[in-house]
């Protein structure tokens, strides 16, 4: 939980805490980065607040990052310039020069005012040019570290670390350290996540034999091969995980590595199709501003198209969209690799901006397998880990961004846990309820159309009603739940079918709901409340007895209170 | 649950009813004569229909809710049953409690009532034990937070 420091620490944490820091070391696992300079001191010695690399000034000045913070001041300055006739006296060039100097100056100032340190098992970040902000994050609360290396960063050998700490609020609570040399970034990452190793902690559902033991890097290799015999593309990589792994000498067990062909799934996934659409929308803003003469060569008039030409144009547009989606996927998911390094699950992806996300394996409580309608046509899927303290809203918990379903299931089994129990279908009453829900909007539109006498509305209503039938049936077919003692699974959804497998111990409560209609149909909805992912996962319209059973068998003694009152009335 | 909850809910229902009744009456008063006939008839009937409905709601609903709502703190967990048309059972184990709050709204204060809200690590997993007598609420909250403290993991 990132907490604001007490008032006493507000001014300068360095002076007050310098004394105890020498004795405190949280970087047992952090190797000597050898990067030298102030930046490395924060990782190795834990004694001094360190600055990031000064090269980051160039990046911040170029990308106008400091501007946001200094905007009020700049607006005032420009207003003064405007009123005092400054434009005439300084000239445009002079003002531009001054602005550039101001940008560099601001970037330099914010770099100078930004320090970070690890002390007392806390990460302390202080920043801010005018208003100072000191943020203290207990190392134990750090759940994930997201390292991003954009094109400019790569040019200068820098990385940007985003640190996600467990927090109830979803606001702007994550800390960011921008501009660390890549070696220092890797070492700091190791110090923050890898250094605290709980004895006896091991990834869920995984035998200790196949487990990378960071303490014995020399003989662990054979063990891995033995432990992962069935791994068709696995093996042991030593420090081959990517550009930043040079300093992390822990073995990496590879779970998944993307293939080029996976990129072709992108046109069938809504979120990837949205990328070219967003691009088009952005470009179309400028279309009106361009001179007419530029389009003189375009001698086509859509209104004179023959049906064949029209179809061709539509096909061309669709092809463009598909290509755009693939290009988007290339930028986002290029060379995706998922490996386990010690107790960390590390994924890397991206073409221009290379993202390395490290997540603590003992914090993974389950996974969600998502299959959109288009993805199901080609048996593709997306896999997301459910991590305590990390909301599933961000892409940080992805275990497989987009790949074959078989691969996703395979990764889920090896990286999280195996779940073989077949899911129990929900009663026919659930089918009736899904159908009614799916058809009702269409029927309402239809009724409105009939009563108002608009043919177009009637047509739309009829189409919606007819489409609602397969949707309702498919939504029913998706429904299911099951449990195997240590974990349970719930599945629902048609446009995006989501199967969630969750450890029993992740449950922080159960909610069972029954409306009047559900009561008549003999079904209830059981919702598991968990401190991971979206926070709640439901078995929709399960037979009432099944719903109670699911809840009662996936909680501790407390959950048995849910069973019918006569049985456990005391 | 405290029996004065019925009084509180009655007042709440009356306030809620007024929010709909007053606009409806205003509509029936100010509807222009030139408006189509069905509109005039509808705005004439609406306030009376609403009034009849709310009279039933004000009298029946609070008592019905009082009869249905249940809460229980067992050695292991907190258990609540709420709702009137649709029922909701919630169970939260004491070992997973993150925070316990007692809140008292202005109306609740008039009736000497309070609500105990129990939050868990789940963004959607909070339980509220509504309309307890203020003294009971304080005791329950105290008891819960003391027992939650006995568990030393981070309740996730």
Image (tube, rainbow, N blue to C red):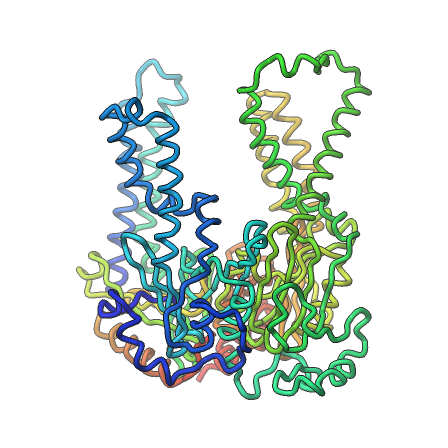
The image position of residue A400, as x and y in percent, is: 67, 60
Quadrant occupied by the C terminus of chain A: bottom left
Above or below residue A267? Residue B129 is below
**Which residue shows up at 55% across the image and 65% down it?**
A526
**Which residue shows up at 66% across the image and 81% down it?**
A212
Residue A522 is at least partly visible in this image: no
**Which one is nearer the viewer's eye here, A86 or A547?**
A86
Residue sitting farthest toward the left: B110
Above or below residue A99? Residue B86 is below
**Which residue shows up at 74% across the image and 54% down it?**
A380
**Which one is nearer the viewer's eye here, A57 or A566?**
A57
Residue A487 occupies quadrant: bottom right
The image position of residue A257, as x and y in percent, is: 73, 63
The image position of residue A62, as x and y in percent, is: 47, 44
Above or below residue A561? Residue B64 is above
In this rendering, would A38 be left or right of A309? left
Residue A297 occupies quadrant: top right
Quadrant occupied by the N terminus of chain A: bottom left
In this rendering, would B129 be left or right of A554? left
**Which residue shows up at 72% across the image and 34% down it?**
A320
In this rendering, would A246 be left or right of A314? left
Residue A278 is at least partly visible in this image: yes
């Amino acid at each position: 939980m990132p907490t604001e420091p007490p008032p006493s620490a507000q001014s300068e944490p360095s002076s007050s805490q310098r004394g105890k820091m020498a004795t405190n070391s949280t970087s047992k696992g952090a190797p000597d980065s050898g990067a030298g300079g102030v930046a490395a001191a924060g990782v190795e010695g834990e004694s001094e607040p360190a600055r990031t690399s000064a090269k980051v000034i160039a990046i911040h000045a170029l990308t106008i990052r400091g501007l946001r913070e200094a905007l009020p001041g700049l607006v005032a300055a420009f207003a003064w310039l405007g009123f005092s006739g400054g434009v005439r006296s300084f000239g445009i060039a002079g003002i531009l020069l001054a602005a550039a100097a101001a940008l560099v100056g601001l970037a330099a100032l914010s770099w100078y005012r930004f320090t970070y340190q690890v002390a007392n098992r806390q990460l302390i970040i202080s920043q801010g040019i005018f208003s100072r902000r000191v943020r203290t994050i207990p190392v134990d609360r750090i759940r994930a570290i997201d390292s991003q290396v954009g094109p400019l960063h790569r040019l200068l050998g820098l990385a940007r670390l985003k640190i996600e700490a467990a927090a109830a609020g979803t606001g702007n609570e994550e800390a960011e350290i921008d501009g660390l040399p890549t070696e220092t970034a890797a070492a700091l990452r190791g110090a923050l996540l890898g250094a605290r190793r709980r004895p006896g902690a091991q990834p869920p559902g995984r035998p200790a034999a196949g487990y990378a033991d960071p303490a014995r890097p020399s003989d662990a290799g054979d063990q891995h091969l033995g432990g992962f015999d069935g791994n068709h593309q696995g093996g042991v990589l030593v420090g081959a995980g990517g550009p930043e792994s040079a300093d992390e000498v822990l073995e990496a067990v590879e779970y998944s590595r993307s293939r080029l062909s996976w990129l072709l799934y992108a046109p069938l996934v809504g979120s990837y199709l949205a990328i070219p659409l967003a691009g088009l929308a952005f470009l179309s803003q400028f279309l009106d501003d361009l001179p007419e003469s530029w389009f003189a060569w375009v001698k086509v008039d859509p209104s004179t198209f023959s049906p064949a030409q029209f179809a061709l144009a539509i096909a061309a547009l669709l092809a463009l969209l598909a290509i755009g989606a693939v290009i988007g996927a290339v930028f986002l998911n290029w060379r995706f690799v998922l490996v386990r390094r010690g107790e960390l699950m590390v994924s890397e992806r991206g073409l221009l901006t290379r993202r390395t996300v490290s997540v603590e394996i003992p914090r993974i409580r389950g996974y969600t397998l998502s299959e959109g309608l288009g993805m199901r046509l080609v048996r593709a899927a997306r896999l997301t880990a459910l991590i305590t303290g990390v909301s599933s809203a961000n892409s940080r918990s992805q275990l497989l961004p987009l790949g074959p379903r078989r691969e996703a299931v395979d990764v889920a089994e090896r990286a999280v846990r195996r779940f073989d129990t077949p899911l129990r279908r929900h009663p026919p009453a659930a089918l009736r309820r899904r159908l009614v829900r799916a058809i009702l909007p269409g029927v309402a539109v239809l009724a409105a159309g009939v009563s108002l006498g608009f043919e177009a509305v009637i047509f739309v209503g009829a189409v919606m009603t007819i489409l609602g039938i397969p949707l309702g049936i498919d939504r029913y077919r998706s429904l299911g739940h099951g449990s195997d003692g240590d974990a349970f699974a719930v599945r629902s959804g048609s446009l995006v079918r989501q199967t969630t497998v969750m450890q029993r111990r992740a449950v922080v409560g159960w909610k069972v709901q029954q409306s009047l209609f559900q009561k008549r149909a003999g079904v209830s909805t059981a919702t598991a409340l968990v401190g991971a992912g979206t926070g709640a996962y439901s078995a929709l319209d399960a037979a009432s007895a099944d719903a109670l059973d699911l809840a009662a068998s996936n909680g501790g003694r407390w959950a048995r209170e849910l069973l019918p009152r006569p049985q456990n009335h005391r | 649950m405290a029996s004065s909850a019925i009084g509180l809910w009655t007042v709440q229902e009356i306030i809620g009813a007024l929010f709909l009744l007053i606009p409806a009456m205003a509509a029936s008063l100010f509807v222009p004569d030139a408006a189509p006939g069905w509109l005039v008839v509808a705005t004439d009937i609406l306030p009376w229909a609403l009034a009849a409905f709310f009279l039933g709601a004000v009298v029946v609903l609070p008592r019905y809710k009082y009869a249905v709502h249940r809460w229980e703190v067992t050695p292991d967990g907190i258990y609540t049953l709420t709702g009137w048309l649709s029922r909701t059972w919630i169970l939260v184990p004491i070992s997973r409690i993150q925070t316990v709050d007692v809140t008292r709204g202005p109306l609740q204060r008039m009736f000497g009532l309070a609500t105990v809200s129990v939050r868990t690590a789940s963004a959607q997993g909070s339980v509220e034990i509504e309309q307890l007598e203020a003294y009971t609420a304080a005791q329950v909250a105290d008891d819960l937070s003391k027992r939650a403290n006995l568990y030393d993991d981070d309740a996730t």
